[in-house]
Amino acid sequence: MNKTKRKIFETSMKLFAQKGYDATSIEEITATVGVAKGTLYYHFSSKEEIFNFLIEEGVKLLKNSIAIKTDKLENSLDKVRAIVLIQIKVLVKYESFMTIILSQIWGNDARSKMCRGYVFEYIQMIEEIVKEGIQKGEITDRRPKCNCIWNFWLYLFKFNI
């Protein structure tokens, strides 16, 4: 990603997190970045495209981080522990991204459905690791810490959607 596109990306992420998608205008993005509309439109055809790119890149980063850490591990409990640490790091380092995706999952518009789909896809990744652990006998009712962690993250991400 070139310097200008990265700046548009980072600025948009901050503005979407602070003000919300609907309250953020293209004019505000270009003014904050310090580029002309033409420059923005050279990189992104619309505000929606910026948003979609932002969400796709954030989810890709999270999933890749998890894959890199968990592929090296054999034990399912170690994988769950690694995921929890990654989630904490992502929450801290990419707070704006998490604010955006979690604030957008509630509606019925295309943007909300896309964000909700990514959250459920992410939960399914974790669920597969837990199922593998149950099949291997690594995760049982005798492991209350693991079950507690799992239930906490399920609660955090599902919210009764």
Image: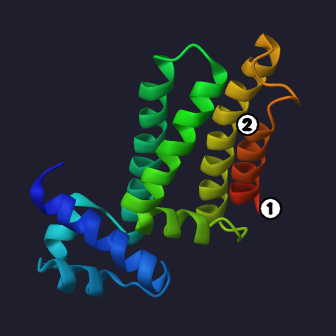
Vertical position of residue 12 compared to residue 113: above or below: below
Q: Identify the residue at horizontal 80%, vertical 31% (top origin).
A: 143
**Residue 135: x %, y % from top left:** 81, 14
Residue occupying image coordinates x 51% and y 69%: 99
Left or right of residue 121, residue 6 in this image: left
Left or right, 2 with respect to 160, comes to left
Judged from the image, the secondary structure of the residue bearing numbered disc 2 is helix
How far is mark 1 from mark 2, CA to CA?
Answer: 24 Å
User: Looking at this view, is 76 or 17 the one in front?
Assistant: 76
Q: Is residue 27 visible?
A: yes
Q: Which of 66 and 8 lies nearest the eye of the viewer?
A: 66
- Disc 1 designates what residue? 161
Tell me the SS state at disc 1: loop
Q: Residues within 10 Å of mark 1 (few under 14, many from 20)?
A: few
- Tell me the amino acid under the disc marked 2: Cys
Q: Which residue is mark 2?
A: 146
